[in-house]
Amino acid sequence: MAEFSLFDSFAKGSNTTLSKKGSNCVIYTRVSTKEQADNNLSLETQRKACNQYASKFGYTVLANFGGTYESAQTDERHEFSSMISYVRRCREKVSHIIVYSLERFSRNDNSIWLSGELRKLGIEIISVTQPIDTSNPSGQMQQKMLFLFGEFDNQLRKQKCMAGIKEMLLRGDWPTMAPLGYDSIKVNGKRKIVINAKGKLLKQAFVWKAQDKLSNETIRQKLFERGLKLNHQRISEIFRNPFYCGLMAHNMLEGKLQPGNHEQLVSKEIFLKVNGLLDENAHGYKLIEENDAIPLKRFLRCDNCGKPLKGYIVKKKNIYYYKCSTIGCCNNRSADFLNTTFKNILKNFNLNVSEELKNVIKNQTIATYNQLTKTSIDEYELLEKAHSDLCKKIGRLEERFIEEQIDNDLYYKYSRKYLEEKREMEGKLLKGSKQLSNLDECIEMALAFASKMASKWDSAEYSIKQKIQYLLFPEGIYYNRENDSCRTNRVNSVFSYVAYFQQLLTQQKRGIPELNLDFASFAGLVARTGIEPMTFGL
């Protein structure tokens, strides 16, 4: 055959003898649950058997994977995916994957396809307890049959498990971990789901949403101030989960709800109100949410009990009123009177000065803001530096992993840690950047509104009126019927400056009588936050 040696480069196929990789292998061990880890099929037992097999037949172990609890129903397992990535990346070195049994490798219908794909790379799966010669079609068929039996056994177990779960649900018992706000405890040997401290906060959140009509973002901030950190999406999921009103929703219930035996966090009426499903009152007539005649409803609060005032109409007189629904408060006043009072309050924020003085006010406001938030700005810069250093760490970690200077365990351990830190930092940076970048825009908007505040509110539609009201007075205005007076706990700091400087420039000393704020007390709202000396030279 020497005369054909010059034609070797044109040959097809591969010489298995020449392309043999040797006897390098990796070991994969797995248990599905902690209970399995404690019995005779422990991870250590599997690893020991695999190492003995490799030693007996002369295999060199390049890496070990597994060593944790992972379900075999999906091939999205972390350790399993790491092992597959490794053997594909090192296919020129690895010839075998050693497992204790084939069911430890995979128990779904993807296992046959995956074993075929690995075989194309020249990698065979060896089972210590199921020795099969997969170098011939007969052995490959036996291996496929074992994979199929494993999947069949999985389906039988799943069927039995699902039947048990459905039976629990029909009894009113929740089969898995209870939602946020609940604890699972044992009472007389039986499992009971009860409300915990977080649940009490969530109950308040439902009330804020149903009665006070607060936005999800406002509620999220209030919960955060009380020690419960949630993202916006999680708040929406909680409000739509009927578990909190005593009903269970589960795929096994086939589109139906089942009353649960757990403690009920809120009433069904509140749950429906939160989700906008109670649009009619007890008398059967539909409530009109947006009504230009009563724009101050729920913004005005009762000075006696603190509850929001509602709006209604006396049809015989065709007159609208604001009223507190608390029995005994008797806090009732015509809408025209209180609307006019609010317009008079807004007139105190009308800034009628030249553009030059507006610029002075703007610069002073920015200077004061920067003075008050200097610490926050310094912290933002430090956070930016820490974020940059962390990105460098992540880049270096990836380089070391690619160059095989560190193993999978070490890489994934620190990768998860660094990425979590990075996400938290980026969230803080995003929040800080919005605060810094929106300052100039906010002040410009405030000055534009302040030029004709009362007329803008009076001519605006209902939703815009609501925004203006809460923009100036974030906590609303309290009304007292006995002395026919209003007060507020908080005025937007930017508009406080606007009104205060307006009074300084016009030399008015009456303050805002409609809010029971004289000049001295109103100035105190501004002065206590700190004003640069040059302000008093105006």
Image (cartoon, grey):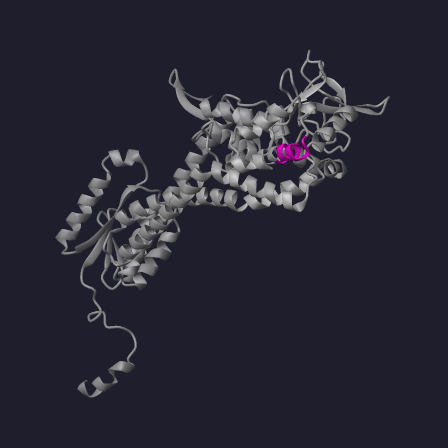
Name the magenta segment's main secondary structure.
Answer: helix
Q: Tell me: residue 377, above or below residue 331.
A: below
Residue 500 magenta: yes
Say above or below: 207 vs 23. Answer: above
What residue lies at 64% left-to-right and 46% top-to-bottom?
A: 356
Residue 490 position, x and y percent, is: 59, 27
Name the residue rendered at 63%, 16% in the picture. Answer: 305
Q: Residue furthest right?
A: 316
Res 351 seen here: yes
Q: Which x, y percent locates residue 496? A: 61, 32
Q: Is residue 251 left or right of residue 396?
A: right
Name the one closer to the observer, 197 or 27.
197
Q: Quadrant of residue 314?
A: top right
Question: Furthest residue to the front?
Answer: 537
Q: Is residue 124 magenta?
A: no
- Nearest the eye: 509 or 320: 509
Place residue 236 in its image quadrant: top right
Q: Which residue: 31% across, 59% down? A: 118
Residue at the far top: name it: 328
Specify whether 498 is left or right of 23: right
Q: In which quadrant will I find the C terminus?
A: top right
Please name the residue shown 71% across and 24% down the image: 310
Q: Relative to residue 307, is residue 292 depicted above or below?
A: below
Chain part drawn in magenta = 498-507
Q: Position of residue 349 (x, y in %)?
A: 68, 34
Residue 10 rendering spot, x and y as whole percentages: 29, 82
Up/down of 196 relative to 384, above or below: above
- Residue 240 visible, this angle: no
